[in-house]
Image (tube, coloured by chain):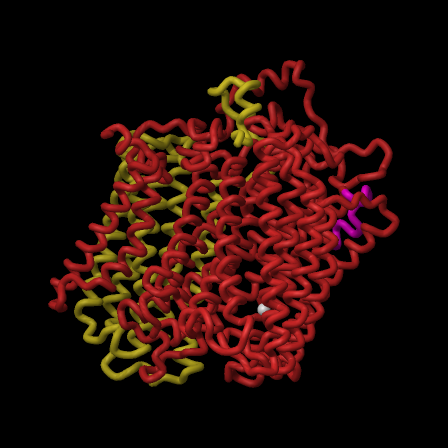
């Protein structure tokens, strides 16, 4: 069986020459567009979990809140503030790198990572002291389901932020080239905005 | 040996699979010991975690992540690293490769492999159903057979085979050197064999047996084999989301100069629409399987009615994906047929813009009809009539397409060769399936035939007579481009006629036994249906054998068929303007598009213009390989 695609190409072309530059038919940065599409599908995952939430709470008409499921609204509120401030520090990092301020970039990205980790730590602490479990009833299930799904996204975001931090400290990124910061950054902002919706739905409504 | 274990490939993958097994054992045992569970080593927990961990370890081992790991660590990487580009021998098809042409062929061959397994499983089912009573397999095994059959053919054949054809053709059609994210493309492909192997491997522990729909709470109370579906679907779903995202970015940002959206071939439009559906809808099936996994593995209560869980919620979430999924399984086929009918009728496609708009209309309407799968589920009554109305309406854009294709054929100069035969076969069979589909939208009727063989007949007319015929049409049509060889036309025609006739003898009688009340998904049936079922089973054997003609034709032609010219169909679209098979980076210089893609029979019509290779511009493009915006900053 002949190698289908390359047999002829290899004869005609030098092995190490690259492709002709692709035409850019849109002003949108491909990586940014890819990330936005990924965020759309993430929004839909959350949409399905919210659907489950409202099915259990409203369509199913379960007792709400179930006995013994009082949530620490104030602590979670503080935690919300921590997560939101991490969006500000991330923006500061971006503004810094655009202005060529590497110290600001490093400080901003490091601070963002630490704030995100703090949020996750407080969240886990809340899980431990909550007093009810996902196995108790559907009300508990959907609480842990939604906040856990969000927590998993914070974790993914943190992994991305750590990569960006490592790269920042290794001297990557400059005034002209910072998509590697901006694209993971937009994901982090999405995680923050999603938390506002989760917090409002679960803790306040 | 140490070198081999360090380099990406099968040695390292095997080692990593072993590591994955140990990791799953360590993790479950540690968690169980920490929470005081006895025994510390539990086989099912180990298996469940292994089902998630081992595939990930395998993907790392085979080499899907090497570049990204280097990138994440801030090590120097070459953004235009094409070391894994192009195939030089058949072995290169078994490695991680970033060339969309190699990946396209990997996709198509892998999907067909699973088609044959799924088809063989169907043969066993028909053997059991040839007579009433129990002969070959018992009830639970039969449930496993139809579940694996449907799951493989939906998630491992129809959806990925279209992604494979599009992977090969779309960058060529739009004048791009590759997909926007070649490494993501490779990862998407490698998740497929993982998902398929998992589903087939469920036979080792007793196959999952709750159908491809896996309704809760049946799926949350089945033996462990069920998890091979629940987790396998996650990998197939992740693969299809990643590919869809890749297609959308490629189509939006990498079209050749002059190739506006309304000059795009309809195959590109079709995959654009499909990809939108995938990106928006597929997360819902992922979520539904997360719910099942959490209920099954960790004792969550999404679906335990006694603890306020909502059972019907599963069906709503599942069908909110799985109705759009029928269009994910259909729209790319619409695109293939549009290409072939225009080329083979030597006429411009009729109503080009309406064809494009009807695709978008289907994307939007596809999200408004999901509960028509739940008319007898006991959901709220008031949802029924709105869903009936929207379901009837969604037939309108599809009808527009059927009439446009017919008008394209009208007074054309028809070249009735194998791709054209399959395209025409699609047109007739899909119309029949569409008509029974509109009938099924009607509440009084669907309540009568729900869960009967009428449904089985309908879905096979749509997915076999519809989708599979377009897949065959597409494979025959692009075979010369993909392999550089011509297939055997006579064998192709024999393949079509055997398939077409035996398909109808197999599935048409199912309408009748269905209306008379034979239930689907049951291994036994009353005596009154015996003669029809025997006829169906006999025909299905010939239908199964007809694929052997196809396999023989494909393999022998690929090995020793006559060499194909660059453009054997005299087509205008860009993929036919380069050699067969195309050069490693598709185009020496990006072509410019100056007209529509289907101006057949229009004197002097041109679609794409290629720069003269002797001129300076093209040479300059050759010598500056890395001026594309870097992928990895
Ligand atoms: Cu449907």
- Going 53% across and 62% down the picture, which residue do you hit? B123
User: Residue B534's quadrant in the figure?
Assistant: bottom right
Q: Please provide percent x and percent y for residue B178.
A: 54, 34
Depicted B201 relative to depicted B255: above or below: below
Q: Please provide percent x and percent y for residue B496.
A: 69, 51
Colour yellow, chain: A
**Magenta stretch bounds:** B344-354
Left/right of residue B95 with respect to residue B364 in the rendered view: left
Most distant residue in the right direction: B411
Q: Quadrant of the C terminus of chain B?
A: top left
- Going 50% across and 76% down the picture, which residue do you hit? B522
User: Residue B177's quadrant in the figure?
Assistant: top right
- Ligand 1 lies in quarter: bottom right
Residue closer to the observer: B610 or A144? B610
Q: Does the magenta-highlighted stretch encompass residue B599? A: no
Depicted B568 relative to depicted A70: above or below: above
Q: Does the magenta-highlighted stretch encompass residue B348? A: yes
Q: Please provide percent x and percent y for residue A165.
A: 28, 39
Q: Please provide percent x and percent y for residue B115.
A: 52, 53
Colour red, chain: B
Left/right of residue B46 with respect to residue B451 in the rendered view: left
Depicted B364 relative to depicted B312: above or below: above
């Amino acid at each position: 069986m002949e190698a289908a695609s390359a047999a002829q190409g290899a004869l005609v072309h030098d092995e190490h020459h690259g492709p002709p530059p692709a035409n850019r038919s849109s002003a949108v940065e491909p990586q940014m567009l890819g990330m936005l599409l990924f965020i759309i599908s993430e929004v839909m995952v959350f949409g399905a979990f919210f659907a489950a939430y409202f099915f259990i709470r409203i369509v199913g008409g379960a007792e709400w809140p179930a006995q013994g499921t009082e949530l620490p609204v104030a602590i979670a509120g503080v935690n919300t503030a921590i997560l939101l401030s991490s969006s500000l520090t991330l923006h500061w990092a971006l503004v810094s790198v655009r202005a060529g301020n590497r110290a600001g970039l490093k400080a901003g990205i490091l601070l963002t990572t630490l704030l995100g980790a703090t949020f996750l730590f407080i969240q886990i602490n809340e899980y431990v002291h909550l007093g009810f479990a996902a196995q108790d009833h559907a009300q508990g299930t959907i609480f842990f389901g939604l906040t856990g799904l969000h927590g998993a996204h914070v974790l993914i975001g943190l992994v991305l932020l750590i990569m960006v931090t490592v790269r920042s400290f290794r001297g990557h990124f400059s005034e002209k080239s910072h998509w590697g910061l901006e694209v993971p950054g937009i994901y982090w902002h999405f995680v923050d905005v999603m938390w506002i919706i989760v917090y409002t739905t679960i803790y306040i409504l | 040996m140490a070198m081999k274990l360090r380099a990406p490939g099968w040695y390292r993958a095997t080692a990593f699979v072993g590591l994955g097994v140990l990791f799953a054992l360590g993790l479950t045992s540690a968690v169980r010991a920490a929470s005081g569970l006895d025994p510390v080593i539990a086989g099912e927990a180990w298996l469940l975690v292994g089902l998630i961990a081992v595939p990930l370890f395998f993907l790392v081992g085979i080499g899907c992540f090497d570049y990204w790991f280097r990138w994440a660590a801030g090590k120097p990487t070459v953004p235009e690293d094409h070391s894994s580009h192009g195939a030089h021998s058949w072995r290169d098809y078994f490695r991680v490769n970033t060339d969309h042409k190699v990946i396209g062929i990997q996709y198509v061959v892998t999907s067909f492999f699973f088609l044959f397994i799924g088809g063989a499983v169907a043969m066993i089912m028909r053997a059991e159903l040839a007579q009433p009573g129990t002969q070959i397999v018992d009830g639970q095994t039969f449930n496993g057979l139809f579940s694996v059959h449907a799951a493989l053919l939906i998630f491992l054949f129809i959806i990925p085979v279209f992604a494979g054809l599009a992977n090969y053709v779309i960058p060529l059609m739009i004048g791009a050197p590759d997909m926007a994210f070649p490494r993501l493309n490779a990862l998407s492909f490698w998740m497929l064999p993982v998902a398929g192997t998992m589903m087939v491997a469920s036979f080792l522990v007793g196959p999952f047996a709750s159908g491809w729909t896996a309704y809760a709470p049946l799926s949350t109370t089945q033996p462990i084999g069920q998890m091979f579906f629940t987790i396998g679907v996650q990998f197939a779903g992740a693969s299809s989301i990643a590919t869809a995202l890749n297609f959308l970015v490629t189509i939006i940002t990498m079209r050749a100069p002059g190739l506006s959206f309304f000059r795009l071939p309809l195959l590109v439009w079709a995959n654009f629409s499909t990809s939108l559906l995938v990106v928006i809808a597929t997360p819902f099936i992922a979520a539904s399987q997360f719910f099942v996994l959490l209920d099954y593995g960790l004792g969550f209560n999404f679906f335990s009615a006694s603890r306020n869980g909502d059972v019907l919620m599963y069906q709503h979430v599942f069908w909110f994906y799985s109705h759009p999924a029928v269009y994910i399984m259909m729209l790319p086929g619409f695109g293939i047929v549009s290409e072939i009918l225009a080329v083979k009728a030597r006429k411009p496609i009729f109503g080009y813009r309406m064809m494009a708009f009807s695709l978008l209309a289907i994307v939007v309407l596809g999200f408004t009809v999901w509960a028509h799968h739940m008319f007898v589920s006991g959901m709220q009554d008031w949802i029924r009539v709105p869903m009936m109305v929207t379901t009837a309406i969604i037939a309108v854009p599809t009808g527009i397409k059927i009439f446009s294709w017919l008008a394209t054929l009208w007074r054309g100069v028809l070249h009735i060769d194998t791709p054209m035969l399959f395209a025409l076969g699609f047109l007739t069979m899909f119309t029949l399936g569409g008509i029974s589909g509109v009938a099924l939208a009607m509440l009084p009727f669907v309540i009568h035939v729900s869960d009967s063989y009428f449904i089985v007949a309908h879905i096979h007319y749509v997915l076999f007579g519809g989708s599979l015929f377009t897949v065959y049409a597409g494979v025959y049509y692009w075979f010369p481009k993909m392999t550089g060889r011509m297939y055997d036309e006579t064998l192709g025609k024999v393949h079509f006629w055997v398939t077409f006739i035996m398909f109808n003898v197999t599935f048409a009688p199912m309408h009748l036994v269905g209306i008379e009340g034979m239930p689907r998904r049951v291994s036994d049936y009353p005596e009154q249906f015996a003669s029809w079922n025997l006829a169906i089973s006999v025909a299905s054997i010939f239908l199964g054998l007809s694929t052997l003609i196809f396999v023989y034709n494909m393999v022998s032609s690929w090995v020793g068929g006559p060499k194909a010219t660059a453009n054997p169909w005299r087509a205008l679209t860009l993929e036919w303007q380069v050699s067969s098979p195309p050069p490693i980076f598709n185009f020496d210089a990006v072509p410019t598009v100056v007209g529509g893609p289907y101006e057949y029979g229009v004197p002097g019509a041109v679609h794409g213009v290629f720069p003269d290779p002797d001129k300076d511009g093209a040479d300059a493009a050759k010598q500056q390989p890395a001026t594309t915006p870097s992928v990895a900053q």
